[in-house]
Image (cartoon, rainbow, N blue to C red):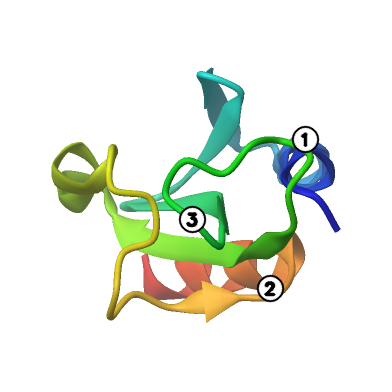
Amino acid sequence: MTLEDANYSLKLECALRELGFIEIRERVLANAGIYYVRPVGFSHNAKLWEDLFGFQVEKSEEWEYHKTTGLCLGKPIIQSAKLALDLALSLS
């Protein structure tokens, strides 16, 4: 799966669950309570056609600090948008 496919998958899951999301520079950021879910690639500046590493779940106050670094070590990486949103909503 590419990052572009992951963005579409995350948008679809948000629409099915009636959750909000925003697009920031070709990236989708889903709002799941006090957590955000976002797709991440293997590098911090991965392009849309590159492979997906997974969906990362992080708290909302940590987003501002890590928004330019890409992958945040120590944060959960989930392999599907559905499971990532399930985890984020269950933690909220």
Residue 89 at x, y = what percent?
50, 64
Which residue, given by chain and number where applicable, does mark 3 sit on? 43
Q: In the image, is 85 to the left or to the right of 91?
A: right
Q: Name above or below for residue 8 compared with residue 74.
A: above
Q: Which mark is residue 15?
A: 1
How dense is the environment of label 1, judged by Cα within 10 Å: few (below 14), some, or many (20 and up)? few
Which residue, given by chain and number where applicable, does mark 2 sit on? 83
Of residues 20 and 70, the one drawn nearer to the viewer in this rendering: 70
Mark 3 residue element: loop
Q: Name above or below for residue 9 compared with residue 78.
A: above
Q: Earlier in the sequence, mark 1 or mark 3?
A: 1
Quarter-of-image position of residue 76: bottom left
Q: As shown in the figure, which amino acid type bears the numbered disc 2?
A: Leu
Of residues 11 and 77, the one drawn nearer to the viewer in this rendering: 77
- Residue at 74% across / 68% down in the picture? 80
Q: Name above or below for residue 9 compared with residue 81.
A: above
Per the model, the C-alpha gap separating discs 1 and 3 is: 28 Å
Q: Name above or below for residue 50 compared with residue 68.
A: below
Q: As shown in the figure, which amino acid type bears the numbered disc 3?
A: Ser
Q: Nearer the viewer, mark 1 or mark 3?
A: 3
Per the model, the C-alpha gap separating discs 2 and 1 is: 15 Å
- Residue at 61% across / 23% down in the picture? 26
Q: Nearer the viewer, mark 3 or mark 2?
A: 3
Quadrant (top left/top right/bottom left/bottom right) for the C terminus: bottom left
Q: As shown in the figure, which amino acid type bears the numbered disc 1?
A: Ala
- Residue at 59% across / 33% down in the picture? 28
Of residues 49 and 15, the one drawn nearer to the viewer in this rendering: 49
Q: Earlier in the sequence, mark 3 or mark 2?
A: 3
Contact check, label 2 and label 1, Cβ < 8 Å: no
